[in-house]
Image (tube, helix red, strand yellow):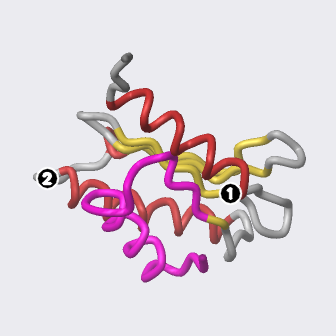
């Protein structure tokens, strides 16, 4: 019997999420990717296939990954507001909604994004 590793499990969860979450022009998709060193988030219009705004926590100063994620969420919300984006759909990228991902989502909500 074959074992499933962590990477394959995340890929399966991501496929399930992406089957349901689609970004439109009126409500683009907020996609999040988390690695060991950084968190990358982008707002994507799937209809046009264009990235509207993107931000990486590698550019943000902070002590912990959670602090960097919260700071990058506020930067992303500010940039999205400048582009006229207020409502998005959240694509957690197959990651569990806890820890850094949850902190990012809550910080983006408090910064003004609706999802």
> Magenta region: which residues?
90-115
Look at the image and say whether residue 99 sits in the magenta stretch.
yes
Residue at the image point whose x is 17% and y is 53% from the top: 62
* First in sequence: mark 1 vs mark 2: 1
Horizontal and vertical percent position of residue 78: 53, 68
Looking at the picture, tell me which residue is in the foreground, 2 or 62. 2
Find the distance from the CA under tag 1 to the CA under tag 2. Answer: 26 Å
Q: Is residue 42 left or right of residue 45?
A: left
Question: For residue 115, which quarter of the picture?
Answer: bottom right
Question: For residue 37, which quarter of the picture?
Answer: top left
Residue at the image point whose x is 76% and y is 57% from the top: 23
Question: For residue 24, which quarter of the picture?
Answer: bottom right
Residue at the image point whose x is 33% and y is 22% from the top: 3
Find the residue positioned furthest to the left. 63
Q: Is residue 8 left or right of residue 35?
A: right
Horizontal and vertical percent position of residue 98: 30, 63
Horizontal and vertical percent position of residue 91: 58, 55
Find the residue positioned furthest to the top. 2
| Callout 1: SS | strand
Mark 1: give few (<14), some (14-19) or many (20+) Cα within 10 Å. many
Q: Which residue is mark 2?
A: 64
Q: Which residue is mark 1?
A: 29
Looking at the picture, tell me which residue is in the foreground, 3 or 101. 3
Looking at the image, is 70 positioned above or below residue 10?
Answer: below
């Amino acid at each position: 019997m074959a074992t499933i590793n962590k990477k394959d499990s995340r890929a399966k969860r991501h496929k399930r999420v992406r089957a349901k979450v689609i970004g439109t022009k009126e409500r683009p998709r907020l996609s999040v990717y988390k690695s060991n060193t950084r968190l990358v988030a982008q707002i994507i219009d799937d209809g046009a296939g264009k990235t509207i705004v993107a931000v990486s926590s590698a550019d943000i100063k902070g002590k912990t990954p959670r602090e960097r994620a919260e700071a990058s969420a506020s930067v992303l919300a500010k940039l999205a507001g400048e582009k006229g984006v207020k409502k998005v759909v959240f694509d957690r990228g197959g990651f569990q909604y806890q820890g850094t991902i949850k902190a990012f989502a809550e910080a983006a909500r408090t910064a003004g994004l609706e999802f």
